[in-house]
Image (cartoon, grey):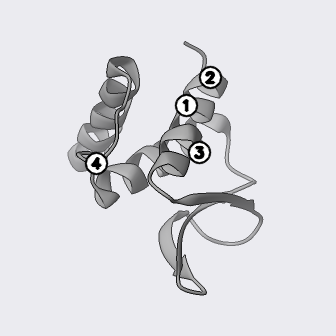
Amino acid sequence: MTHQQIYDELKQVAEQKGLLVRLEMGDFDGGICTVRDRRVILVNRRHDISRRVHVIARALYDSGLDDVFIKPAIREVIEDEVARARAN
């Protein structure tokens, strides 16, 4: 699976959870936040696709994964991204 395919799959999972994914420019790392009473995953447009995948994966993990079906390959990506972040 390419990074773009993983990114698209993660966005679909976010939508299933009722989370909006917004690609914005600015001086921020990205992550989950609340904008006008709606939970949003902000992704920095300046980051490369692998960093975008990381941001969405971490945000999904932080929001909980038990309430939505996630393809096993995508669940593995999320778990790998979280484990890699914890190791750093």
Q: Marks 4 and 2: which is nearer the front?
A: 4
Disc 1 packing (10 Å; few <14; some 14–19; many ≥20): some
Name the residue carrying label 4: 67
Whichever of labels 3 and 1 marks the residue nearer the N terminus, that label is 1
- Relative to residue 55, is residue 80 drawn left or right? left
**Disc 2, disc 1: CB below 8 Å?**
yes
Disc 3 packing (10 Å; few <14; some 14–19; many ≥20): many
**Disc 4, disc 1: CB below 8 Å?**
no
In the rendered structure, which amino acid carries the disc numbered 2?
Gln
Residue 41 in the image: state x and y as whole percent.
Answer: 55, 62
Residue 9 numbered tag: 1
- Relative to residue 65, is residue 46 drawn left or right? right
Residue 5 numbered tag: 2
Give the total of numbered labels.
4
Please tell me which residue lies in front, 57 or 12: 12
**Disc 3, disc 1: CB below 8 Å?**
no
Q: Residue furthest bottom?
A: 36
Please say whether residue 53 is visible from this viewpoint.
no
Q: Is mark 4 on a helix, strand or loop?
A: loop
Please tell me which residue lies in front, 15 or 49: 15
Q: Distance of mark 2 from mark 3, alpha carbons?
A: 12 Å
Q: Marks 4 and 1: which is nearer the front?
A: 4
Name the residue carrying label 3: 52
Residue 85 in the image: state x and y as whole percent.
Answer: 31, 47
In terms of image quadrants, where is residue 68?
Answer: top left
Residue 19 in the image: state x and y as whole percent.
Answer: 52, 59
Whichever of labels 4 and 1 marks the residue nearer the N terminus, that label is 1
Residue at position x 73%, y 71% in the image:
26
